[in-house]
Image (cartoon, helix red, strand yellow):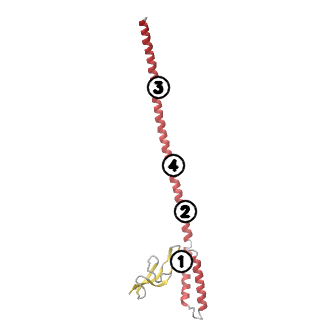
């Protein structure tokens, strides 16, 4: 009987080992499948994170583009406000020049032209104040150093009174609109002694 018992125990052990091996194999299969599923999910997660990062980048770029467009539009509007009067002021410059010529052709001391002189002078001052309100300034460089950015030299003459490269005579005043040169002043430059 002991032999039978040993044999039965051996068979029982074999059955148990077979069942344990089957359970272990089943667990190993389940773990392998779980590992594959985890790897698959990790890949999907990485792909989705890449998509999110790409979309965030595109949102940031779009926001930057919108901000740049706003800035450009604001600059364009500012320039339009500043320089919208440029054509109109250019049409007024000959009027200012003619009024200055009328003043040069009359005298405040001569009774015959005194009233005309005063009327033209008052009109010129009023017109200059009016255009100054809109950013127009005169360039009248008499006695100043010659600046080729704001002055146009008509010629050079020797002069004892004026230092070299200074403006000794202004033939026509220049004008600027909001720090932009509309017309350079036409000047005679001193050569010095």
Q: Residue at label 4? A: 56
- Residue 181 or residue 20, whichever sits in front: 20
- Dot 4 or dot 2: first in sequence order is 4
On screen, residue 176 above or below 168 = above
Instruction: Bin the neighbour count of mark 1 within 10 Å (Cα to Cα): few under 14, some 14-19, many 20 and up.
Output: many
Q: Which residue is mark 3?
A: 27
Q: CA distance from mark 2 to mark 3?
A: 68 Å
Residue at the spot 55% in from the left edge and 70% down from the top edge? 82
Earlier in the chain: of badge 3 and badge 4, it is: 3
Q: Label 2, on which residue?
A: 73
Vertical comparison of 7 with 132: above or below: above
Q: Of circles 4 and 2, which is in front?
A: 4
For label 2, the SS is helix
Q: Residue at x 48, y 42 (%)?
A: 47
- Asked whether the residues under the numbered discs 3 and 4 touch, taking CB atoms below 8 Å apart as contact, a structural biologist would say no
Outermost residue, left direction?
193
Q: Residue at x 50, y 53 (%)?
A: 61
For the N terminus, the quadrant is: top left
For label 4, count other residues whose C-alpha is less than 10 Å away and answer few (under 14), some (14-19) or many (20+): few
Q: Is residue 128 left or right of residue 7?
A: right
Q: Residues within 10 Å of mark 2 (few under 14, many from 20)?
A: few
Viewer-nearest residue: 182 or 46? 46
Q: Determine the image quadrant of residue 17.
A: top left
Residue 108 rendering spot, x and y as whole percentages: 57, 91
Query: SS class of the residue under badge 1?
Result: strand
Q: Which-is-in-front pick, marks 2 and 1?
A: 1
Instruction: Pick whichever of labels 2 and 1 is earlier in the sequence.
Output: 2
- Does 141 sit left or right of 125 as displayed? left
Reading the image, the residue beneath label 1 is 137
């Amino acid at each position: 009987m002991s032999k039978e018992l040993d044999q039965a125990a051996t068979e029982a052990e074999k059955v148990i080992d077979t069942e344990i091996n089957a359970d272990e194999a089943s667990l190993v299969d389940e773990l392998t499948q779980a590992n594959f599923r985890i790897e698959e999910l990790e890949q999907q997660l990485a792909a989705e994170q890449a998509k999110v990062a790409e979309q965030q980048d595109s949102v940031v770029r779009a926001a930057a583009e919108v901000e740049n467009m706003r800035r450009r539009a604001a600059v364009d509007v500012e320039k339009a406000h500043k320089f919208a009067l440029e054509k109109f002021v250019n049409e007024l410059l000959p009027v200012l020049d003619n009024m200055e010529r009328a003043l040069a052709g009359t005298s405040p001391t001569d009774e015959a032209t005194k009233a005309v002189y005063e009327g033209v002078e008052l009109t010129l001052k009023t017109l200059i104040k009016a255009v100054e309100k809109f950013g127009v300034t005169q360039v009248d460089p008499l006695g100043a150093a010659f600046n080729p950015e704001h002055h146009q030299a008509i010629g050079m003459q020797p002069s004892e009174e004026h230092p070299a490269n200074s403006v000794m005579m202004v033939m026509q005043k220049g004008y600027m609109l909001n720090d932009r040169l509309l017309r350079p002043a036409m000047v005679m430059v001193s050569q010095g002694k």
